[in-house]
Each structure stands twice: as structure tokens, then as C-alpha cells.
Amino acid sequence: MIQDAGWIRRPAWMGMSLSDDLRVRVVEAVESGASRRQAAARFGVSISSAIRWVRRWRDQGEIRARPQGGDRRSGRIEAHAEFLLDRIAQTPDVTLAELQALLRERGVAVGIGTVWRFFERHGISFKKNRARRRAGPTRRRGAPAGLVCSASRSRSPPVGVHR
């Protein structure tokens, strides 16, 4: 999003819901006898939007825009939160793939990313600890015995001498 003089402009490809006031006016115009096309033209909205708003008003009694984005399906895995938290308490080095397989056995088909986000929401991370770090760092620790670590003569020219 681009901020311009205090206003946030959304890119053209990013949808934005229209105000509830505009929705109410379109629905009221249709309810008072105008066609959906006439109401759309009068208020400068698309015909399809006017049709959807009026249908939603008549079917559900709701005019407000539905929430955009966000997570709408985390309830599936949150229902098994106790099971997952107990499992990692019993086996701290369990992998996400193993947890995914255990959930599949319980009838919950989720991806590894969903399992990862579950633990991220609960503030649990799988970090390597010192006891499991057997190989050590990959950085060089120094020259092997018998090799010269420094040059026998300086390779930089003496101070004040220019080439």
C-alpha cells in the first residue's frame, strides 16, 4: 500500500469494500422501487455489486461487507490444540511432518504450514539446542598444525612509497 499525504492508496489490483452507507442507499433505492441496474447507475457502483448487496440483504438481512483476508480455517486445528500441545510435551523433538501424520490419523487433513502457524500462534518454536548440536559450527576454526598462518614478509609496500 502506498501512503500519500496521510491517505493510504491501495493498488488497483487490491480490492476494497465500499462503505456501509453506500450499500444502505443502494438497497433502499431498490426497496423503494428502482431496479438494481438503475440503483447501480445512480450511485456509481457496478450492477453485479448492487445485485449481490440486495440479494444478501433479502436472504440474510445483512448489508455490511464481509471480512476480507485473514485466517478463516484455523478452528479445525485449534480444536486439536490440547492433543498437539500434549504431544510436544511428551516428545519435544517431534517433527511437523510427524504431527501432520498424527492429525491425519485423527481425521484432520492439514498442511505442514498449518501446523507451523498453529505453533507460531501459541508461541512455540522448534529451536536446536546445544545437546543436539553434535557437528559443531561449519566455520573454519583456524589453520591445521604445520601450516604457516602469516606471510614471512609484508606484502604491503612501506609507508610513503608509491608505485
Image (cartoon, rainbow, N blue to C red):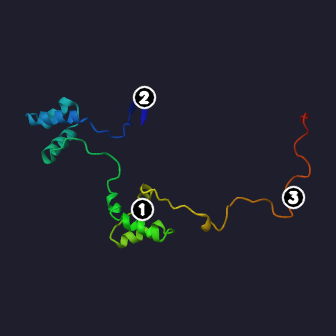
Q: Residue at x 84, y 56 (%)?
A: 149
Q: Quadrant of residue 127?
A: bottom right
Circle nearer the viewer, 3 or 1? 1
Q: Residue furthest left?
A: 33
**Residue type pointed to by label 1:** Val
Above or below for 39 versus 113: above
Q: Identify the secondary structure beneath mark 1.
A: helix
**Residue type pointed to by label 2:** Asp
> For this view, does 147 lie left or right of residue 72?
right
Q: Identify the secondary structure beneath mark 3.
A: loop
Counting residues from the start of the chain, the first of labels 3 and 1 encountered is: 1
Residue 64 screen position, x and y as percent: 22, 41
Q: Are marks 3 and 1 in contact (CB under 8 Å)?
A: no
What's the distance in space between the residues labelled 2 and 3, CA to CA?
A: 61 Å
Counting residues from the start of the chain, the first of labels 2 and 3 encountered is: 2
Question: Which one is in front, 46 or 157?
Answer: 157
Q: Which mark is residue 115?
A: 1
Q: Identify the secondary structure beneath mark 2.
A: strand
Task: Name the residue tied to disc 3.
Answer: 148
Q: Are marks 2 and 3 in contact (CB under 8 Å)?
A: no
Q: Quadrant of residue 1?
A: top left
Q: Residue at x 43, y 63 (%)?
A: 112
Residue 67 screen position, x and y as percent: 29, 45
- Which part of the image, by quadrant, shows the C terminus? top right
Residue 60 screen position, x and y as percent: 15, 47
Q: How many marks?
A: 3
Q: Are marks 1 and 2 in contact (CB under 8 Å)?
A: no
Counting residues from the start of the chain, the first of labels 1 and 2 encountered is: 2
Q: Residue at x 40, y 66 (%)?
A: 84
Task: Name the residue tied to disc 2.
Answer: 4
Above or below for 106 versus 79: below
